[in-house]
Image: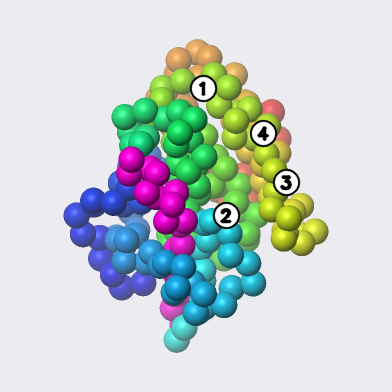
Amino acid sequence: MKPRRQRAHSLLARLQLGLEALYRVETKLAIDAFVIDDAARDRMQPARAPREQLLLREMDGELAMALFVDADALANLERHDPAAQLDDRNFTDFCLAVEGVSHFVYMALAAARSRPVSQLELELQAEVDKFATCFLVTGAAANLRRRLFGDVTYADDLDADERERYRTANNEASRYTEALERRFVARAETGALLAELRRFYRMDLPDKLGRIAQLA
């Protein structure tokens, strides 16, 4: 993981800077240097080819990463900038981009500390990151949890274990963000909300699940 961050121009780079600022972390990596297109992903022959995918491979004791995000989604976000307005035109694609950037940042930080990360932990944090990012962009939480966690469908090509993992991440993130709304958003305690999100981010999976159970 040698590429260094340069000036941020792309939407993915801006999301990376936003997530790292939110959580007060720094990967010192430029996400654009890790982004691949359809052809490059096809050459890697992954078992699945979803619209967003973080591909990992250990090489010579280092973790190699490549991030794929659907080109049509990125093009739509360039046409309809979520920083200007997040609505039905760009909401789904924005969440897709946030998920990819979330996976990239979380794995980069874990790899730098040689900390193992389960797929469930990765997916759970991405779901929380979607809520946090959408809320901070819009300043409103009304109907956000329903859109993120209620209106959910799963890809047909998921196996039983994958489907259960995504369902668990969705359910746990829904419980956690409901508690965030109740405890912090409803009281307009943004500072306390950010502090809670930052503590949660630094927990491992057992502690994350324990924190959710405590707050729910």
Give the residue type at disc 4. Answer: Asp
How far apart are the alpha carbons under marks 1 and 2?
Answer: 23 Å
The image shows residue 18 at horizontal and vertical percentages of: 34, 42
As shown in the figure, which amino acid type bears the numbered disc 3?
Arg
Q: Residue at x 48, y 43 (%)?
A: 93
Q: Secondary structure at mark 4?
A: loop
Color encoding of the figure = rainbow
Q: Residues within 10 Å of mark 4 (few under 14, many from 20)?
A: few
Q: Residues within 10 Å of mark 2 (few under 14, many from 20)?
A: some
Residue 96: give its label. none
Q: Measure the C-alpha gap from mark 4 to mark 2.
A: 21 Å
Start-end of magenta stretch: 61-79
Whether residue 52 appears in magenta in the rendering, the answer is no
Q: Amino acid at mark 1?
A: Ala
Closer to the N terminus: mark 4 or mark 1? Answer: 1
Instruction: Give the residue number, with chain letter if any, for mark 2.
Output: 122
- For disc 3, the marked residue is 167
The disc at residue 151 is 4
> Residue 40, how many percent across, how many down?
44, 74
Say what secondary structure mark 2 lies in: helix
Q: Position of residue 177 (x, y in %)?
A: 59, 30
